[in-house]
Amino acid sequence: MIEFHLDPRSGVATYLQIVQQVKEALRLGTIEVGDQLPTVREVVADLAINPNTVAKAYRELEREGLVVARQGRGTFVSNTLARGTIRHHDALRESLERWLDAAQNAGLDEESIRALISSTLRETLARRVA
Amino acid sequence: MAWVTWRQHRSQVIAMGALVATLAAAIVGTDLPIRAAYHRDTLSECLPPTSRAGCDIIVRHFLGQFDGWVTALRGLAVLPALVGIFIGAPLLARELEHGTHRFAWTQGVTRRRWLLSKTTLLAIATVATSALASALVMWWRSPFDTLDGRISPSGFDIEGVVVPAYALFALAVGVLAGLLFRRTVPAMTATLIVFVSTRLVVLAFLRPHFLAPLHRTAVASDTGRQAGDWILSDTLVDAAGRPITAGREDLAVLHAQQAGIDPHSYLVSVGWKRAISYQPAGRFWEFQLIEAGLFTALAVAIVLLAIWLIRRTPS
Amino acid sequence: MNAPPLDARALGKRFRREWALRDCTLTIPKGAIVGLAGPNSAGKSTLLALAAGLLAPSEGSVAVLGRDPLREPSVLAEVGYVAQGAPLYRGFSVGETIELGRRTNSRWDDELVAHACSGASLATKVGALSAGERALLALALALGKRPRILLLDEPFAGLDPLAGREFLKLLMDGVAETSATVVIASHVIADIERVCDHIVLLAGGAVRLTGNVEELLESHRILMGPRRPLGPIRGVSEIVRERYSGRQATLLVKSDDVIRDPSWTVEHVALEELLLAYMAPERLPTPRPAERAALRWHG
């Protein structure tokens, strides 16, 4: 089950944060096809946000084909984003942790690590396309 | 609303009940010696119109023996006022003072229905307890009523159907006062003042004239009792019917004394009489119904006014 | 059935000589969660009290769910109202308070109330509850009648942040369950910014701003630049507030188009900033002729 968290200062609209968190959960395999998303009532009772916001997020996810709303029964995951990569996650997570240890030992702070990851990711993706 | 009314006013209703229960205990407890004395002196033989010799002495002793209790019982006339002060006035004043009317009047019951239901239910409880109190008093006072009558205020005000009517009136005045003053203490004070003044005005100016008073003349020296009747006025008048001032009467007595004549016989010989206006004992129930009707009608009118006004109360 | 949940027309209320609310015209759309904002004595409580049938208008009219709450008090069965301070009978227990709600409301949802009061012990006297618990109980009662519109007057006053958050959670849960329209009056914007999709700003008894929050934030910008005499700026339809310090000018503007003027730095406005600008005294609306159009609701 997903647990949403809200960052009111991130500048990102609330409904988008929910959409992003659902997508992230899909990518990580936290939720799978057939799982039910928390009901609107559950989400607002937990986060204290407008039910329309949650409804809007779920509609957006439905529009993107990731979930489907069943009248009277809830909203269910209908598609995956992981594309079968989840089985690789554990090994990848381990090597990432080792890399992060090395980076911290080398003296990089959080901001520098993020900058290094972002720029390397960008370059790598650009190379792939080209 | 029955549940709500009971839950909010149960301590008041229970207090009313406890008061009447205490009264009942006192009534029953004090009744034994009275009945005993009554039978011991066979006072039943001294009731008017029977008039044995020596009855006046026996009656005087009997009345004197229990005079303290009889006088104390007259204090019960204050009970109806308590209904108005402690049940009627806080009804609305407390809600308005504490702001809880913003809670009570925004549920599914309209203000008018809320007030009508509460007042009706409390009125029923009031009538029941005050009728019971009145019945107890009437039972206790029966020997005194037969000897002394009950149409005069000492008996009238605490017996019969007027007691519930007074209580209803007090309740109504309290409710309206609570609505107008919006604070408990001013409402209670206003209720007391209005209740007492109204009772006094009716007693002093209206009740003597519910039905046209009867008149009779008596011999100037006659100091006999007129058992049971309510004497409204008893004045000395001359042969032509003009009232005689106390000063003039004193002069006449002085004149008689100086002339060596018995003053009483002198007054009779100059043709002076006593003019007595009174209400006869037999009119007790008629007067009770008139006065009870008056106070009940006032109570109903006041409550209807409160119900009409409550919609206009700002919050 | 299709009447808006709350509709005020030139609504005014006078106490003795002071007008607490004047010439207030607004319509609240169904299903909205409206923040009624403004400083103290702005007229927020007065507006809600008029809507709840606790006050009679001095001028104009107010209709709740299409009916006048004073002439047709039966409409109050569908209106949930929590006054400032969440008044309840202090001598009642929690259970008895709920019983009062059950007995005086024809439509009553026991399950919803039980769910809302799951934290409280039924035997506790209301007087012994904390301010937060009382507010929750008052809200639970208001929700228990499954209202179509909820009017909350300064519910966060006197509540610590944790209690305030619990209150919002219960409120949103209740709204999700009942689809009620909500109007929350609060002079602290942060409390309601989280949940409101519409804003009504009152100040000095007058409506200063109304609209959908997203649209309002999208249609206003902060412009910063060197201080200079101002001419028309492309993309700006109205300057709401001007501030000057030294050689810098900061403007809060209403924009009808993208602002591409390079001499100004353009930034988004935060809701609180926007409301403060519209509350400023110099923005007092000029006396209008009788024939002006009513303020339209955005969205």
Image (cartoon, grey):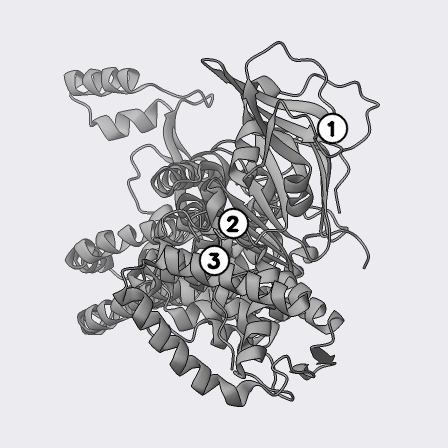
> What secondary structure is found at the residue carrying circle 2?
helix
Q: Which mark is residue B28?
A: none
Q: Is residue C26 left or right of residue B49?
A: right
> What secondary structure is found at the residue carrying circle 1?
loop
Residue closer to the observer: A123 or C123: A123
Which of discs 1 and 2 lies nearer the camera? The answer is 1
> What secondary structure is found at the residue carrying circle 3?
loop
Which quadrant of the structure image shows residue B276? top left
**Residue C112 place in picture, x, y as percent:** 54, 74
**Residue B67 place in picture, x, y as percent:** 19, 54
Question: What chain does mark 2 sit on?
Answer: C
At x 64%, y 32%, the residue is: C207
Instruction: Please check whether the numbered discs 1 and 3 fall on a single chain.
Output: no
Question: What chain does mark 1 sit on?
Answer: C
Answer with mark 1 or mark 2, whichever residue precedes in sequence.
2
Q: Amino acid at mark 1?
A: Gly
Q: Is residue A23 left or right of residue C188?
A: right
Q: Is residue C107 left or right of residue B261?
A: right
Question: What chain does mark 3 sit on?
Answer: A
Dot 3 alpha-carbon crowd within 10 angstroms: few under 14, some 14 to 19, many 20 or more: few
Real-space CA distance between mark 1 and mark 3, rounded to the nearest whole angstrom:
31 Å
Say which residue label 3 marks.
A7
Residue closer to the observer: B150 or B312: B312
Real-space CA distance between mark 1 and mark 2, rounded to the nearest whole angstrom:
30 Å
The answer to whether residue B77 is seen in the rendering is yes
Dot 2 alpha-carbon crowd within 10 angstroms: few under 14, some 14 to 19, many 20 or more: many
Say which residue label 1 marks.
C235
Q: Which mark is residue C192?
A: 2
**Residue C32 place in picture, x, y as percent:** 67, 54
Q: Amino acid at mark 2?
A: Ile
Q: Quadrant of the N terminus of chain C?
A: bottom right
